[in-house]
Amino acid sequence: GQNIDQPTEMTATEGAIVQINCTYQTSGFNGLFWYQQHAGEAPTFLSYNVLDGLEEKGRFSSFLSRSKGYSYLLLKELQMKDSASYLCAVRDWEDSNYQLIWGAGTKLIIKP
Amino acid sequence: NAGVTQTPKFRILKIGQSMTLQCTQDMNHNYMYWYRQDPGMGLKLIYYSVGAGITDKGEVPNGYNVSRSTTEDFPLRLELAAPSQTSVYFCASSQGMRTSSHEQYFGPGTRLTVT
């Protein structure tokens, strides 16, 4: 079956570094996405990984290990505006179709 | 370039009423999606479309219907609203599905309460 697991909530301090983990089980993995969602707003795209390794984009980096079914999102130099939910989503090939499977999201709370 | 727009932003329905949630995108994307998001839960796909005239069911299609007569518009119809349909509804679009350009662009959402 298909399954995505993320921690429900994490707390970190302004200026620090935080790592949000995502583990997944899918039959036809074809890419992993991270989205950011501020409370009451729509999700917005952060990063995409399809090959193993680290993708860096400014303060945000995303890592993928396909053999372990594991990804993480690394946020550096945390700012108060980074308080949001972070959604992990996996593109899966099943039943002759691609579909995006979403995790429940990790709520990140930044404290001064 | 407005991106993806949705109307209304908020709506309260009585049990058994019907309504249509509107969604329009101006990015000429072929793929469009309707999701619902319940508190503390991930996004659940209701219906999607790969182009005008083509729609398909997602994970939770019961109680909903869609149509796609143009590339730009993808309305979601709720017939006989039930309390279980209380949720936030997001419309999204993307350029493709198979390639790395599968980034989805979301509308601002419609908050629906059924009482």
Image (tube, grey):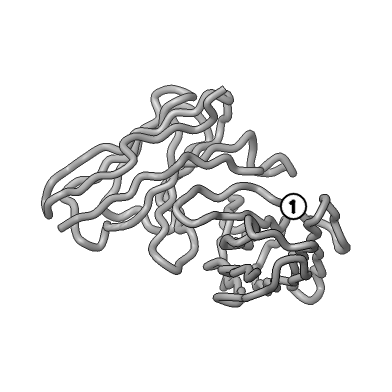
Which kind of residue does numbered mark 1 sit on? Tyr
| Side of A58 relative to A40 (left or right) | right
- Quadrant of the image containing the N terminus of chain A: bottom right
**Res. A92 visible in picture:** no
> Residue at 74% across / 65% down in the picture?
A73
Q: Quadrant of residue A90?
A: bottom right
Question: Can you identify the residue that label 1 sits on?
Answer: A48
In depth, the one of B97 and A71 nearer the eye is A71
Q: Which chain carries label 1?
A: A
Q: In which quarter of the image is residue A70?
A: bottom right
Q: Which residue lies furthest to the front in this view?
A: A112
> Residue at 45% across / 41% down in the picture?
B108
In depth, the one of A67 and A40 nearer the eye is A40
Q: How many numbered callouts?
A: 1
x, y percent for residue B82? 19, 58
- Quadrant of the image containing the C terminus of chain A: bottom right
| Side of B20 relative to A11 (left or right) | left
**Res. B22 visible in picture:** yes
| Side of A72 relative to A111 (left or right) | right
Secondary structure of the residue carrying tag 1 is strand
> Residue at 85% across / 56% down in the picture?
A55
x, y percent for residue A78? 73, 63
In depth, the one of A52 and B3 nearer the eye is B3
Q: In this view, does A13 lie above or below A32?
A: below
| Side of B75 relative to A2 (left or right) | left
Label 1 CA crowd tier, 10 Å (few <14, some 14–19, many 20+):
many
x, y percent for residue B61? 35, 53
x, y percent for residue B48? 46, 43
Q: In which quarter of the image is residue A59?
A: bottom right
Q: In this view, does B48 lie above or below A18?
A: above
Q: In this view, does B112 lie above or below A72?
A: above
